[in-house]
Amino acid sequence: MCIIHRILASAGLIGTIPPEIGKLSYLESLTLSSNDIGGTLPTELGNLLELSQLLLWDNELTGSIPSELRNLNSLRSLALSINQLNGTIPSWIGESSAPIVSLYLYRNELTGTLPPEIGNLTSLRYLDINNNILTGSLPSEIGKLASLILLDVYNNLLTGTIPSSIGNLYYVTKLALNSNQLVGTIPSEIRNLVQLKELWLWGNELTGTLPSEIGYLTSLSAFSVGPNRLNGTVPTEFGYLKDMWHLSLGGNNFTGTIPSELGQLSNLTVLLMEGNHFTGQFPPLMKTCSTGLISLCFDNDHLTGDIPSECDCSPWTP
């Protein structure tokens, strides 16, 4: 009898993954997630040539990602998140012929850069590498991932600019570049991301103005760019974002008045504008407040007038 699926998630397993696992040559799926498995990934995993899913997230695995995994040409899902893996994201991941659809490496201790070879994974739909210690810039090759739905690089040490090629990710719904050290402007090519629902850019060193084109991303429901070093005014086009529930612009250098068009965002529940240089009257957000605005912050701005009493709101941090 040939074992083709091995699912032992949340089974209370301890110890290490035995090298004998490599003898299960017909294995197509190996799931050992949410256990207490430690030690390193055995190189013998590279013998499982039929493997399409390797799901080992939420354990206590250490060491680096073994190069022998490059032999897994049938691999579609690789989930090694929430471990203690170190070393780099190997370039061979992008040199393999495997049709990888999902790559989850978040919450490890990975260092080095995101290799440009990642752009060769044209089937990739989910790339989540948040909460590591990655450095360097986002490679322009990221724009080759035309099938990508999720890109999350939150809380690393990434530098450089946001590549304009990111505008090629037509199907992406969540783009999380927050809590890094990115500089430069928000590329206008972001207007191409018509499926985008969440755009998280806070906690960087971005400069320039807010592209008015963002206001035409009508699927956008969450947008956060504070704190950064952005300036200029808030585009009136933001009033088109009818699905918006979270809008955070705090901790920048925005000036001018807050456009009254924001009062049309009837789904808004979080509005953070503090730490800017807005002037003029407090905007007429009565409609928004009456439909559920629960977090509102304008501290350190230069607005006149009172926050409507209907807004029983408290500050919220991004």
Image (tube, rainbow, N blue to C red):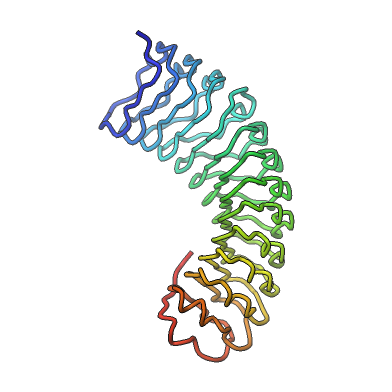
- Looking at the image, is 215 positioned above or below residue 275? above
- Looking at the image, is 205 positioned above or below residue 151? below
Give the farthest residue toward the bottom.
Answer: 305
Give the farthest residue toward the left.
Answer: 12
The quadrant in which residue 169 appears is: top right
- Looking at the image, is 90 positioned above or below residue 304? above
The quadrant in which residue 205 appears is: bottom right
Which percent across, then down, holds residue 28?
45, 19
Quarter of the picture holding the N terminus = top left
Residue at 44% x, 70% y is 316
Using residue 283 as the reference point, say whether residue 48 is left or right of it: left
Using residue 311 as the reference point, say whether residue 279 is left or right of it: right
* Visible residue check, residue 203: no
Which percent across, then down, holds residue 241?
61, 65
* Visible residue check, residue 153: yes
The quadrant in which residue 146 appears is: top right
> In terms of depth relative to the viewer, which is nearer, 285 or 135?
285
Which percent across, then down, holds residue 293?
46, 74
Residue at 57% x, 82% y is 301
Residue at 47% x, 78% y is 289
